[in-house]
Amino acid sequence: MLNRRNNLGVLSLALLVTVSGVAWASEEDIPSFKKRGDVEKTFFGRVGSAVVKVARSKPQKVSLLSHELKLDTPKRGRAELTLKMEYYGLVTKRRYTADVSLTLDTSDKDNWEVIDLRYADTNPNVIGPNEKKIQEMKRAFNK
């Protein structure tokens, strides 16, 4: 009789843990304001990836390593976005890093505008990045 009660207790506890786990899994789907940086990181990764793909011909495995957004720099209503990207060469398969720097007009909080865009990378290719296409990205980002 005592063993049967212990087994029922263990079974009840296991059921409770399982049900709690299901409730916990559904709570994970709710976004947290403390983790809102994940959305920014995804967006900034897409921005950096677009710049690298325009700057270099056929980069492979483009990804964001880090980002930094400095608001009200160098003056009020401006921001400096610095992205550290990595990509691999199509032919060489070597890893290269790229620095993308954007100066943004943030005076309208819902409608930011790219004022300046700078690009540099560690790829020693003599052709270099396509500066004309990089500067055209400013217009594309502001559409």
Image (spheres, grey):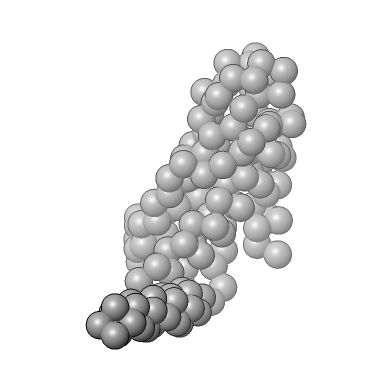
**Whether residue 13 is situated above or below residue 78 in the rendered picture:** below
Q: Quadrant of the C terminus?
A: bottom right
* Left or right of residue 32: residue 135: right
Q: Residue at x 65, y 62 (%)?
A: 142
- The quarter holding residue 79 reads bottom left
- The quarter holding residue 7 reads bottom left
Q: Residue at x 54, y 67 (%)?
A: 112
Question: Visible in this render: residue 10?
Answer: yes
Q: Residue at x 45, y 52 (%)?
A: 81
Question: Visible in this render: residue 100?
Answer: no
**Whether residue 125 is situated above or below residue 14 in the rendered picture:** above
Residue 113: x %, y % from top left: 57, 63
Report the front residue among 40 and 99.
40
Q: Count every numbered label the image shows and give the total.
A: 0
* Left or right of residue 73: residue 42: right
Report the front residue among 32 and 134.
32
Residue 140: x %, y % from top left: 71, 56
Residue 124: x %, y % from top left: 58, 16
Q: Quadrant of the N terminus?
A: bottom left
Q: Residue at x 56, y 73 (%)?
A: 111
**Whether residue 83 is situated above or below residue 44 in the rendered picture:** above
Residue 15: x %, y % from top left: 42, 80
Report the front residue among 9 and 24.
9
**Whether residue 6 is situated above or below residue 38 in the rendered picture:** below
